[in-house]
Amino acid sequence: MYGRFFNKILAMLPNKGIIVVCFSLFLVYMGIMMIYTMLPLYVNSLKGSVYEIGLAIGSGGTGYFVGALLFGWLSDLVKRRVAFIILGHLGLPIIAVGITLSKTPLQVMAVHFVGSIIASASYPSIMAYTADMTTKEVRGRWMGVVSASFFLPMALGACVAGYALQWGYNMVCYIAAVMGMFSAVLVAFLVKEEKLVEE
């Protein structure tokens, strides 16, 4: 009885690559949510208006919109899922460090927009990688795991940022940058481009 149960569990598990990319996605989007939580306060500290605060946050969403369409198409075109995942993870340190160097709300908007275009490479590439590495019998549940790795950080990232803000805005950015760099290195060393799983 128990043998059959554990065999079913093992059959559900894909290669370790999907586990690693889901964990890296979790870390990266926690860092992104830390930035989003801190951003209104940071722009306000730069004497930005309410309108500029809205633009600074919206510039990130606009960058993700543009980048997701672009990198989703490129991922299918060149079939380099892992390379785009790594590139996307490096977008977070670019955003975080760029914000710490920004001295005006306009600079924050520009950094957030450009960095978000780069960071957007991760999510569609991870979804495509998961589809490539799973069969149709278990694909839906692993897409659910990927989505959970994206949504849970929305809550946790805000909590971590709220705590880290007691040490200043830069501390939040530095933590987020380290999480992005660590995630990129993790994927680079532990995940390889592989052939599609046979249906």
Image: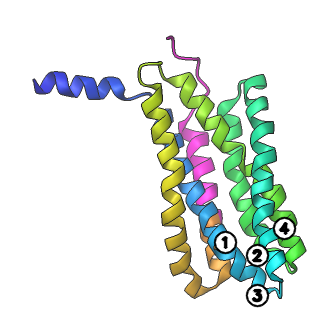
Residue under numbered circle 2 = 100
Do residues under tags 2 and 3 come within 8 Å of each other at their CB atoms? no
- The segment highlighted magenta reads 177-199
Comparing labels 4 and 1, the label whose residue is closer to the camera: 4
Which amino acid, by three-letter code, is at mark 2? Answer: Thr
Do residues under tags 3 and 1 come within 8 Å of each other at their CB atoms? no
- Relative to 67, does residue 45 appear above or below in the rendering? below
Name the dominant secondary structure of the magenta segment. helix
Q: Which mark is residue 173?
A: 1
Label 3: few (<14), some (14–19) or many (≥20) C-alpha neighbours in 10 Å: some
Q: In whole angstroms, how far apart are the C-alphas of marks 4 and 1?
A: 15 Å
User: Would residue 16 be visible to someone looking at this image?
Assistant: no
Q: Tell me the residue at 54%/30% (across/down).
A: 130
Comparing labels 2 and 4, the label whose residue is closer to the camera: 4
Q: In whole angstroms, how far apart are the C-alphas of marks 4 and 3?
A: 14 Å
Q: Which mark is residue 151?
A: none
- Front residue of 20 and 157: 157
Q: Tell me the residue at 76%/75% (across/down).
A: 100
Point out residue 197 in the picture as x, y percentages from the top left corner.
Answer: 52, 16
Which amino acid, by three-letter code, is at mark 1? Answer: Cys
Q: Earlier in the sequence, mark 2 or mark 4?
A: 2
Q: In whole angstroms, how far apart are the C-alphas of marks 2 and 4?
A: 12 Å
Q: Tell me the residue at 54%/56% (across/down).
A: 27
Q: Quadrant of residue 113?
A: bottom right
Do residues under tags 1 and 2 come within 8 Å of each other at their CB atoms? yes
Q: Quadrant of residue 4?
A: top left
**Which of the image's four quarters has the N terminus?**
top left
Q: In whole angstroms, how far apart are the C-alphas of marks 1 and 2?
A: 7 Å
